[in-house]
Amino acid sequence: MSTILAIETSSELASAALLHKGVNSSRQTAGVSTHSQSILPMVQALLQDAGIALRDCDAIAFGAGPGSFTGVRTACGIAQGLAYGADKPLLPTVTLLAMAQACREQTGASDVLAVLDARMGEVYWAQYRYTDGWQIVIAPSLSSAREVQPQGEVTACGNGLQAYATDFAAQPFFATALKDMLPQAEQIATLGAIAYAQGLAVVASAAEPLYLRNKVALTTAERLEKAAKEAA
């Protein structure tokens, strides 16, 4: 049974988790201004509570994105620093899949639509199906809320649903959706353990964030063009 340390900082919620001897322990801090300052103390506390050191972990999983540009870079950078120091492999994990995992844990759903607020009038979203393991139905995408069109019936989750409630209100999945969900390290650890067992760990130098947005800011002209398209 593997021991997986996990960190997740892709949203306003920073969290760390430790999957050890079948027990998944986690800590989180919301609303912090600098996730890089909060993650390491949480990691140290988790390891101390479990009575182990970082070198005793088999691998380090992290939320690779999509999400906040700064947040996913922070998670990747911290994970790489820990991995280099302890000579451990990394398990980059998609944040939207972690949300789907949390949704399944809470509802038992097999077809899940995960929607994360991407700001700037857009959402990150993906659709997954669980059949003896997760399968990608629609790969992680970036679009306006109006463009989110899942295949078939789904259970939806994610704070993007709440951020753009007006756009999603008419969708059949909206009424029962888990609208305030954010990616968390506990599910990153769970998925990381599965990936580790499948031999999907990578060396620290090969780990990269998952970016779906090429630019963080739009020019004034681009914002006006975007607004015109959405109003059409």
Image (cartoon, rainbow, N blue to C red):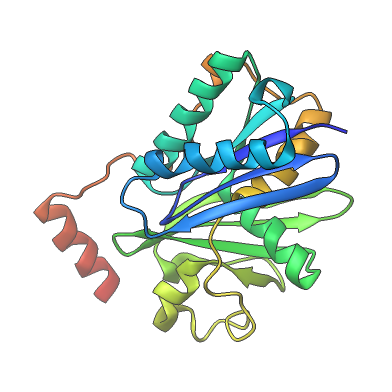
Asked whether, in this view, residue 125 is left or right of residue 187, the answer is left
Q: Position of residue 10 (x, y in %)?
A: 46, 48
Q: Quadrant of residue 56?
A: top right
Q: Quadrant of residue 87?
A: top right
Q: Could you tell me if residue 232 is visible in this image?
A: no
Asked whether, in this view, residue 87 is left or right of residue 11, the answer is right
User: Considering depth in this image, is 198 or 71 the residue closer to the camera?
Assistant: 71
Q: Could you tell me if residue 83 is visible in this image?
A: yes
Q: Quadrant of residue 61?
A: top right
Residue that appears at 62% across and 66% down: 150
- Quarter of the figure with the N terminus: top right
Residue that appears at 76% across and 57% down: 129
Vertical comparison of 200 with 64: above or below: above
Q: How many numbered discs sit on the rendered protein?
A: 0
Q: Position of residue 32 (x, y in %)?
A: 36, 54
- Quarter of the figure with the C terminus: bottom left
Q: Residue furthest left?
A: 220
Q: Position of residue 192 (x, y in %)?
A: 71, 37
Vertical comparison of 113 with 128: above or below: below
Q: Position of residue 119 (x, y in %)?
A: 33, 60
Asked whether, in this view, residue 142 is left or right of residue 104, the answer is left
Residue that appears at 52% across and 15% down: 205
